[in-house]
């Protein structure tokens, strides 16, 4: 990537560059004049086909058009000593791709055997074939990345189990993703792995061994069993499971501080626990239900569950303003605009809309359609179709080894995965809250048509849409009453 230009300085460099006509330090004298450092770098990266038919780097200028060295008379060393191709040279006469190949081979080869583990060969080939070699070099030359591969390359076989023995880090997760994406090791359950890494630290918060044993059993026989029933663990299940375990740990710590053993738990303890803290203490009802089934406490104990449906909603006026801002904003990345539009117009959960593939989106000259988990395609009228047209023309994150052939509409930074919902929620928070936007949209949509049709098009269950419809009807009735009261007054 070219360096950002500083303001020109006519006092220091009175003679302007022959190409940009700006006042910068002049570094070369070419047939078309003296060239500044910025134009010199840009010339080494100019690629195309010269009027003579030569295809490669075109550093020269003839009548304002890029030209090869032979035609323009520009003298410039751009011949790689390793592959012989014309390219910008990086080090020791090697182009970026040849330098990347050398660094990858040196770092992934076991110095004891002179061989690369079969699984690491997949990463080696993927990185060597990257379209953006400079990104690969920048990543692999970082100290923590080199240190990680130095730990890994001495093993003849690389597996999930081996990776699990290494210290947790973003580098370990990224390399695991690369290995999975390129077929070297089987695909794992990302959120299950994150939960399993989190639980030991959470359990260690408990001071008493009996409490740690209870929570360990609760996780094994209740939380993980639920995850097994779900299949691939969703982000929602992961967050809900963490919250459930956290509240259960807080509950046991609270009982221990009061000197109450779990087997002696009484209804008065539960009532005080719930009355003396936030409403989220009701989440302990999940732990209590398991404890009753496991015969750890009296079966008649009761705890009022945490009540859902109290989250704030974006009202209709705020939605309209937010949609207008995201459709026309030039400050926001195009994919963030596309995500916000789907959120605000169709009330989709982030997890679902981030999992869209290009099989779900059809781009035609006159129409863009999208399928959102329902049975029918939905038309995106202009101008809300524009971000999707831009994404189709210029896809993100396709230049590195992480996404060689990705079909995601919103590919993420982790290999083979779409953007993380938590990351996007954080990026959108400055302009719109994801949950408030989704709930507000569903609230308004249920006023516009039968719940069964809305559910079918948006991929929701009829029961979910029916709940939002009830809330809409109640609010609309309150609105009508207020209007009547004003008229009477």
Image (cartoon, rainbow, N blue to C red):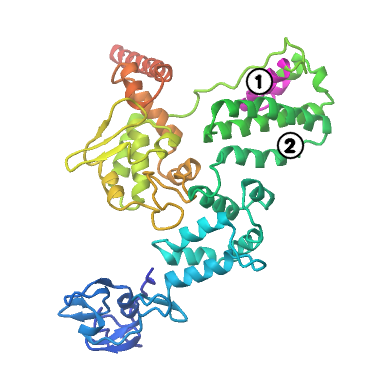
Q: Residue at x 26, y 83 (%)?
A: 69
Where residue 277 appears, x then y in whole percent? 67, 27
Q: Residue at x 39, y 29 (%)?
A: 440
Task: State the SS at label 2.
Answer: helix
Q: Is residue 189 left or right of residue 78?
A: right
Q: Residues within 10 Å of mark 2 (few under 14, many from 20)?
A: many
Q: Nearer the viewer, residue 44 or 37?
A: 44
Where residue 16 appears, x then y in whole percent? 27, 85
Instruction: Name the residue that disc number 1 marks.
Output: 285
Quadrant for the N terminus, please. bottom left
Image vertical order of residue 415 relative to residue 250, above or below = below
Q: Is there any visible trace of residue 14 in the rendered image? A: no
Quadrant for the C terminus, please. top left
Q: Is residue 387 magenta?
A: no
Where residue 138 appears, x then y in whole percent? 49, 66
If you read the primary sequence from the N terminus, does the residue marked by circle 2 or circle 1 appear first?
2
**Where on the picture, by quarter, is residue 2?**
bottom left
Task: State the SS at label 1.
Answer: helix
Image vertical order of residue 395 relative to residue 359, above or below = below
For the residues labelled 2 and 1, the Cα–Cα distance comes to: 19 Å
Q: Nearer the viewer, residue 479 or 67?
A: 67
Residue sticking out furthest to the right: 259
Instruction: Name the residue that disc number 2 marks.
Output: 203
Magenta extent: 272-293
Q: Is residue 175 left or right of residue 213?
A: left
Tell us which disc is closer to us: 2 or 1: 2
Q: Main secondary structure of the magenta part?
A: helix
Image vertical order of residue 420 relative to residue 64, above or below = above
Q: Is residue 289 magenta?
A: yes
Where residue 385 appears, x then y in whole percent? 25, 41
Q: Is there any visible trace of residue 205 in the rendered image? A: yes
């Amino acid at each position: 990537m070219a360096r950002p230009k500083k303001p020109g300085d006519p006092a220091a460099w009175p003679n302007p560059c022959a190409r940009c006509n700006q006042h910068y330090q002049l570094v070369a004298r070419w047939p078309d004049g003296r060239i500044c450092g910025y134009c010199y770098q840009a010339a080494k990266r100019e690629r195309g086909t010269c009027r003579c038919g030569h295809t490669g780097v075109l550093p020269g200028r003839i009548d304002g058009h890029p030209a090869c060295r032979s035609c323009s008379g520009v003298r410039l060393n751009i011949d790689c000593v390793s592959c012989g191709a014309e390219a910008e040279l990086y080090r020791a006469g090697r182009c970026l791709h040849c330098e990347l190949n050398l660094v990858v081979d040196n770092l992934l080869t076991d110095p004891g055997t002179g061989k690369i583990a079969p699984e690491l060969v997949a990463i080696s080939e993927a990185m060597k074939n990257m379209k953006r070699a400079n990104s690969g070099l920048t990543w692999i030359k970082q100290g923590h990345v080199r240190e990680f591969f130095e730990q890994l390359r001495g093993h003849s076989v690389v597996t999930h189990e081996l990776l699990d023995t290494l210290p947790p880090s973003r580098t370990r997760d990224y390399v695991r993703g690369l290995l999975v994406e390129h077929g070297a090791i089987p695909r794992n359950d990302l959120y299950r792995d994150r939960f399993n890494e989190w639980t030991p630290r959470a359990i260690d918060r408990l001071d008493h061994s009996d409490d740690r044993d209870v929570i360990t059993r609760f996780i094994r026989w209740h939380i993980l069993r639920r995850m097994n029933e779900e299949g691939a663990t969703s982000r929602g299940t992961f967050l809900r499971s963490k919250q459930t375990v956290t509240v259960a740990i807080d509950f046991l710590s609270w009982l221990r501080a009061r000197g109450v053993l779990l087997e002696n738990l009484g209804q008065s303890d539960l009532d005080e626990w719930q009355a003396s803290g936030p409403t989220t203490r009701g989440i302990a009802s999940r732990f209590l239900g398991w404890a009753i089934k496991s015969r750890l406490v009296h079966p008649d104990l009761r705890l009022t569950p945490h009540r859902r449906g109290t989250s704030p909603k974006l009202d209709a006026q705020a939605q309209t303003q937010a949609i207008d801002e995201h459709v026309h904003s030039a400050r926001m990345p195009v994919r963030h605009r596309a995500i916000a539009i789907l959120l605000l117009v169709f009330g989709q959960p982030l997890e679902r809309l981030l999992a869209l593939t290009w099989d779900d989106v059809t781009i035609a000259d006159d129409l863009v359609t999208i399928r959102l988990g329902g049975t029918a395609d939905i038309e995106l009228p202009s101008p809300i179709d524009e971000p999707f047209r831009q994404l189709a023309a210029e896809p993100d994150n396709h230049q590195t080894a992480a996404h060689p052939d990705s079909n995601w509409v919103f590919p993420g930074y982790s290999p083979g995965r779409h953007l993380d919902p938590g990351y996007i929620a954080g990026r959108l928070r400055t302009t719109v809250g994801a949950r408030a936007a989704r709930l507000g949209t569903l609230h308004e949509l249920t006023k516009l048509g039968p719940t069964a049709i809305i559910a079918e098009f948006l991929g929701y269950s009829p029961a979910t849409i029916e709940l939002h419809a009830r809330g809409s009807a109640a609010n609309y009735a309150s609105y009508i009453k207020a209007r009547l009261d004003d008229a009477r007054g």
